[in-house]
Image: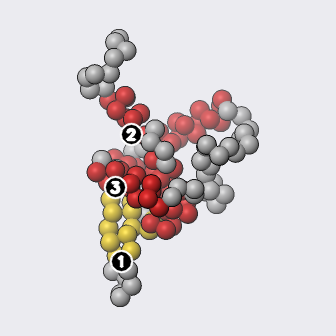
């Protein structure tokens, strides 16, 4: 097998999408159901609003999430995000990462500034 990735390689492309910082955290948070922007920001934890907006727009372009706008009766409209069927299929990826981590990473290491952590309220 060639080590060059000049042609279409599904695994290479998927890794490119999923390795973007915060993407899997966003997917994981939305696996529990739809969330408004602020609720999602709290669930992801540590991601600034501009980056979260950019990631959400990209995931929407890839049809992994959908965005709908709720009328807030005179207040600013509320954006609500949910996973599409394709996004929901990432549950198996999250489960595989969870299983691998439990088998090979042992107890959680101390948090470092470079590695985002799951919010305290989110059970594994």
Q: Are marks 2 and 3 in contact (CB under 8 Å)?
A: no
Residue situated in front as seen by the camera: 76 or 105: 76
- Is 50 placed above or below 18 here? below
Residue 55 at x, y = what percent? 40, 52
SS for callout 3? helix
Distance (Cα) linking label 3 and label 1:
17 Å
Instruction: Give the colour scheme shown.
Output: secondary structure
Report which residue position mark 3 lands on.
57
Q: Residue at x 68, y 43 (%)?
A: 112
- Badge number at residue 77: 1
Disc 2 crowd rating (10 Å Cα; few below 14, some 14-19, many 20+) is some
- Compared with 122, 105 (above or below) is above
Residue extending farthest to the left is 7
User: What residue does disc 2 label?
Assistant: 17
Rendering quarter of residue 75: bottom left
Instruction: Give the x, y percent position of residue 39.
Output: 51, 67
Which circle's residue, 2 or 3, is located before the other in the chain? Answer: 2
Q: Secondary structure at mark 1?
A: loop
- Circle number at residue 61: none
What is the count of numbered marks? 3
């Amino acid at each position: 097998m060639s080590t060059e990735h000049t042609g279409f390689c599904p695994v290479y492309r998927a890794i490119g999408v999923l390795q973007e910082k915060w993407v899997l955290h966003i997917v994981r948070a939305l696996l529990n159901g739809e969330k408004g922007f602020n609720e999602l920001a709290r669930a992801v934890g540590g991601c600034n609003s501009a980056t979260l907006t950019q990631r959400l727009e990209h995931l929407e372009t890839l049809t992994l999430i959908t965005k709908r706008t709720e009328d807030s009766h005179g207040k600013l409209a509320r954006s609500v995000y949910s996973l599409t069927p394709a996004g929901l299929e990432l549950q198996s990826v999250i489960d595989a990462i969870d299983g691998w981590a439990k088998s090979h990473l042992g107890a959680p290491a101390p948090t470092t500034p470079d590695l985002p952590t799951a919010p305290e309220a989110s059970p594994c």
